[in-house]
């Protein structure tokens, strides 16, 4: 600012009104978007009154200690309204400076175009891809309810907080909102409260042309408590609605009629306010209309004071500390365990216990499908890992995700660790993300690998947020057989590997599967996809060094004195590669077989290790994987060969398909000989 | 069969009952699944009575001419019940022999594990991935309504048929069902009638644990006509329900209470019948319970006669032929045009007209974002192509999918060619598939490239079915700038290229964009993804030969006398590659620039052409694309380099991001020099 502005309390020196407080959001939003020359002022301006009531009257949080474990969770599912989130964080006292808001959408700022997971400033999840925020919220509410069931004791409600979600028309149109909200109703997630920003506008204009749902009726059909027709600009009406929601034991939807871009005299109520700056003239007119007589990025002290939630937050946490202290006295072990789980620390004995379990598992030479190997591992690990919570998108018996200590969670009993998500792959994955984000759990979820497609953007969000979501993807190739090409993954393994920060494990036997699970459990900063076979795979024998190298993602499984060629394989094709190497050896041709269960882990090794596995001089290389070939050329080069499948599969017994498409020892043998 | 069975009419020689007819489906389903030792008997046995009423009393089709353009469309959205579809095709007289049914799920049979698009035997779409069949059905119903609006004239209802969909709990749990059914309500697709197989069972068991929607209320909230609580085993009740549906001008859902595996005395009503053979003993018991005293795969003549729909179908088509004949007399041009469009032939003048339009477009040297170039092309092509129908998932103004002759379709007026799909990417893509499958249209749909993730499995289904769905994916890289990493595609272009039979075009300027559109329009046997920039890209100059080579997917855009290196680039990075080549030339380093807008098209060229563009001897190669690098190694080899982005982007102005991540002429120059 050129001149030092005269700061006023509230015009006449009076306390600011609720509307004045809300206008602070509006001003920050329109000014930040204008400064960035891009962004979405409409939603923050439209939802400012709702946000003011929620944050000042209901939200239990502590900006001074944003990671307080019993804080309420707030999710802005309509993430394009990010300036609402940043304004709230700044105004209520989180460590988000006004300079960060001035730098909205600039390189290196904490105020990205869409909110990026940073709980230190109250951002509980990354949003923007519509429908996923509400689904994360459902996951958080499920985590809270389940954690409460695990830890609360009579008279000791140490886990007791709510999840609040803002969402818009876009979220409600997205299919994932159906998946999440239907399941939230069934699971009776009564502490989930959503505010629907019913402004009648989406990017293409008035939603009547493409969105005519009776949304209250829809949500009642899900078993929700719905408060319809609330004036989203009337604090008293909003309070009454929230009070009704709090009184219900069902998840609640508060349908708020709002005006998008509220306050902009010439643009409010139109799509023009949705995703573009208002412009200097309209901003000036809006200032006038709102009675907001302060320069950009200046919040007068009375308004600041009206928003500052720090002392209230500290008092709330102090009060909870007393509850927790009493709990600690009565249940010291439980208290310590709750703290451990919320800190995200693995159990103290995890390293030793998991190693011992893997040793037992590795001692067996059983031929198992790797999905079965996954179950064996879950059975072994789960008793050591009470934070493990899992489920399947209605394929429990196929994914083999239900282990011996699984207990199914129901709407009436959250004291379990297994969720039957129904046929809702995307909803499952985004709820798993919400469970991780809440804390206290390591969640996994299963479906057929092909249907990773349905969940794909939620996997991407886990990768982007660097959170530990574990996916159990079974039936990983044409090896699933008769169900045919709709269910046979071809491009999926390669496609998951393309996603930055996604660890993709495709183990070849029971031991590699157990190691993959251990890696996934210990990988706290990103998601893992476990790619598992339907069909049985023989156990490979390994030296101790080979066993230790599994974790490195790629290693020499079978070597020769002076190898003339390398065959790289993963998963179900390792068995075939080994058989080919044996056959070639019988003909006097020395071949090294490299098992590469996790390309990302291998890439992360140092150059010396990678060179020891794939020596540059050994450039006669064949990669074998029952899927598309493209990704393997960076290992075999222009002179190598890839045996894969660059077409869709067929419906037939698996063995016939492997034969038909050349996944045989004979074919590998021929290809190696062609190369030499 | 070992012995020649004694064929009976119906036990006592009487005409078969409706139940007897339905039992033919049950017998074929349980016997075929048993023979294959895999499959899903439960749904066909549970829905047999519904199917019998629909096919024998209502469905208007002609097994003798399965491609009759005015046939009703039937979709089995719960595609795992494929034996229901095959039994119906066989029984009603389609050319699907009993041997094909004996060979259920065997290599090379027409009776795959899930129904595969083959209208010649009445399979209107490939189903199995749940929720997509009903969405295809909504697309078909929209196509019918729109085609009727285009062609029908008073007294001449030449386009007048219905779409019937069977669906189960799984379809209703999937989010895409929400997208499709919500939009079907808004668009008043009154000729869409769905039968919900409400059997209370999914794979994990009784659905009460994970699916407690009040489905009738949900669909009423969408504006559907719902007939609730129909006994799905009572033909009279079913007839009454269908008659009610026919009387409504809304889409209809008939909720049928059924027993999964109906007839199996010890397994019906349980998940045990869902996805596994009943077993020989239970099949014997079921035969007894149903009174079905015939050997496997034997249908007695009276039952066959009761099902045979051929003469009724021929009569139906003959009657329509009279309608069409009168129409032809009165509107000969319209009749010819309808026949052309339903045959899938492009307009006679298309080749010349589109070439002329492209010449005009190519003459301009304007700098355009390729999304803008796409709009320019649409404006040029659309007047020549009345079958073009398009839309956007609520990003019309961003995708630039609305062209000068677009007319928006509404619930009350289907006489248009533009659909605002709402924020429903998956629903949009699967509806586009349904529109193609119906015939009469070339459909396209737009969204941001990042949200191709949401639609991914529908793109796969288009690729698998080899149908012409066109996707307009804009904002194709970090070049979208401030919206940040949630909206910045990184892995998406590479990931789409992995999908078999998907043509992925990432043009570098207006001319390449127009050629890509032409290719997409002329590619009748697979989907195309047009990957378009948000930001402006300069026009490249080309010789006539270079222009002609665009269609080959990769070509030399800028050459040097004796090139020392090749830089391969696509889309927005071509401009930078050309600048780098110019800078290198100034330093005396000769570099060839290859523009590769479509890798799939390039791969399809003969070896001589590919060698002319990328000579094996010229192995100093650098690929440049603002996305993940993995796919490019097959062009640059182990000794080449890829300039890409193997991490997520950031929120900032685009130019800063290109600089930060090394997409600059300077960086390309440095990398080329390192290689040499």
Image (cartoon, coloured by chain):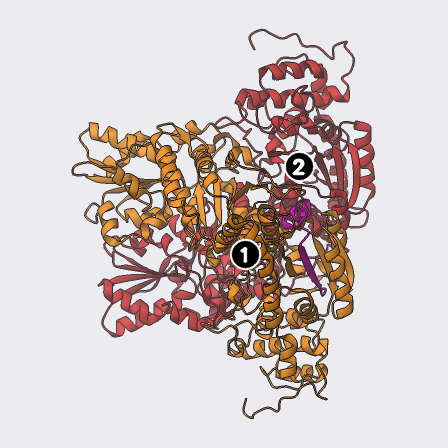
Chain colours: A red, B orange
Above/below status of A96 relative to B278: above
Element type at mark 2? helix
Q: Nearer the viewer, mark 2 or mark 1?
A: 2
Q: Position of residue B407 (x, y in %)?
A: 57, 37
- In this orientation, which residue lies closer to the viewer: B188 or B45? B188
Task: Tell which residue pokes out farthest to the bottom in this image.
Answer: B3
**Residue at left offset 41%, top offset 51%:** B523
* Residue density around tag 1, few if under 14, some if 14–19, many if 20 or more, within 10 Å: many
Q: Which residues are magenta?
A: B179-200
Which quadrant holds residue A240?
A: top right
- In this orientation, which residue lies closer to the viewer: B139 or A663? B139
**Residue B142 painted magenta:** no
Above/below status of A226 relative to B466: above
Quadrant position of the N terminus of chain A in the picture: top right
Q: Position of residue A486 (x, y in %)?
A: 51, 61
Pointer 1 indicates a residue of which chain?
A
- Looking at the image, residue A537 sits to the left or right of residue B254; the answer is left
Q: Position of residue B644 (x, y in %)?
A: 37, 40
Of mark 2 and mark 1, the one earlier in the sequence is: 2
| Residue picked out by circle 1 | A451
Q: Is residue A341 visible?
A: no
| Residue picked out by circle 2 | A207
Above/below status of A59 relative to B223: above
Question: What whole-number distance in Å separates the C-alpha atoms at marks 2 and 1?
Answer: 31 Å
């Amino acid at each position: 600012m050129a001149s030092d502005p005269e700061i006023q309390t509230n015009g006449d020196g009076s306390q600011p009104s609720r509307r004045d407080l809300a206008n602070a959001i509006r001003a920050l939003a329109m000014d930040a978007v204008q400064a960035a020359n891009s962004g979405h002022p409409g939603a923050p301006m439209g939802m400012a009154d709702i946000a003011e009531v929620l944050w000042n009257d209901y939200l239990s949080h502590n900006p001074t200690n944003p990671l307080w474990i019993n804080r309420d969770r707030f999710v802005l599912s309509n993430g394009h309204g990010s300036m609402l989130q940043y304004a709230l964080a700044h105004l209520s006292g989180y460590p988000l400076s006004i300079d960060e808001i001035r730098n909205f959408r600039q390189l290196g700022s904490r105020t990205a175009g869409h909110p990026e997971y940073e709980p230190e400033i109250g951002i509980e999840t990354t949003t923007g891809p519509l429908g996923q925020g509400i689904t994360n919220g459902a996951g958080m509410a499920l985590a809270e309810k389940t954690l409460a069931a695990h830890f609360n004791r009579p008279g000791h409600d140490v886990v007791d907080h709510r999840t609040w979600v803002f969402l818009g028309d876009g979220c409600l149109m997205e299919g994932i909102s159906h998946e999440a909200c239907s399941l939230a109703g069934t699971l009776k997630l009564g502490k989930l409260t959503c505010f629907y920003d019913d402004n009648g506008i989406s990017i293409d204009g008035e939603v009547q042309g493409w969105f005519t749902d009776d949304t209250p009726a829809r949500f009642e059909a899900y078993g929700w408590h719905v408060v319809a027709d609330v004036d989203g600009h009337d604090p008293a009406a909003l309070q009454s609605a929230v009070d009704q929601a709090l009184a219900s034991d069902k998840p609640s939807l508060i349908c708020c009629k709002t005006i998008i871009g509220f306050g902009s005299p010439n643009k409010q109520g139109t799509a023009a306010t949705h995703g573009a700056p208002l412009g200097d003239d309209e901003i000036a007119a809006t200032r006038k209309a709102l009675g907001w007589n302060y320069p950009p990025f200046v919040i007068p002290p009375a308004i600041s004071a009206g928003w500052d939630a720090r002392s209230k937050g500290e008092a709330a946490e102090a009060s909870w500390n007393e509850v927790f202290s009493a709990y600690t006295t009565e249940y010291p072990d439980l208290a310590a365990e709750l703290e451990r789980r919320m800190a995200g620390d693995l159990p103290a004995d995890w390293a030793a216990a998991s190693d011992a379990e893997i040793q037992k598992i590795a001692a067996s030479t059983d031929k198992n499908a790797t999905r079965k190997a996954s179950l064996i591992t879950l059975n072994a690990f789960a008793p050591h890992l009470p934070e493990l919570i899992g489920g399947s998108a209605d394929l429990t018996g196929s994914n083999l995700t239900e282990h011996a200590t699984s207990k199914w969670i129901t709407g009436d009993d959250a004291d379990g660790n297994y969720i039957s998500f129904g046929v809702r792959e995307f909803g499952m994955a985004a709820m798993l993300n919400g469970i991780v984000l809440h804390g206290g759990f390591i969640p996994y979820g299963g479906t057929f690998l092909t249907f990773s497609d349905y969940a794909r953007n939620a996997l991407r969000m886990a990768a982007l947020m660097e959170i530990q979501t574990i996916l159990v993807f079974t039936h990983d190739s044409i090896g699933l057989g008769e169900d045919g090409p709709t269910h046979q993954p071809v491009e999926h393994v390669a496609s998951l590997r393309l996603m930055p920060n996604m660890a993709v494990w495709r183990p070849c036997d029971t031991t590699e599967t157990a190691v993959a699970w251990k890696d996934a459990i210990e990988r706290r900063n990103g998601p893992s996809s476990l790619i598992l076979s339907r069909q049985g795979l023989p156990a490979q024998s390994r030296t101790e060094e080979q066993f230790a190298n599994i974790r490195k993602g790629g290693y020499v499984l079978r070597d020769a004195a002076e190898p003339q060629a390398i065959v790289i394989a993963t998963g179900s094709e390792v068995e075939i590669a080994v058989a080919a190497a044996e056959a070639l050896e019988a003909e006097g041709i020395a071949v090294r077989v490299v098992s590469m269960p996790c390309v990302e882990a291998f890439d992360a090794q140092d150059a010396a290790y990678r060179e020891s596995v794939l020596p540059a001089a050994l450039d006669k290389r064949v990669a074998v994987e029952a899927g598309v070939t493209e990704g393997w050329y960076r290992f075999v080069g222009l002179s190598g060969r890839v045996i894969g499948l660059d077409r869709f599969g067929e419906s037939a017994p698996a063995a016939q398909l492997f034969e038909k498409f050349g996944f045989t020892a004979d074919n590998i043998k021929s290809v190696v000989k062609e190369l030499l």
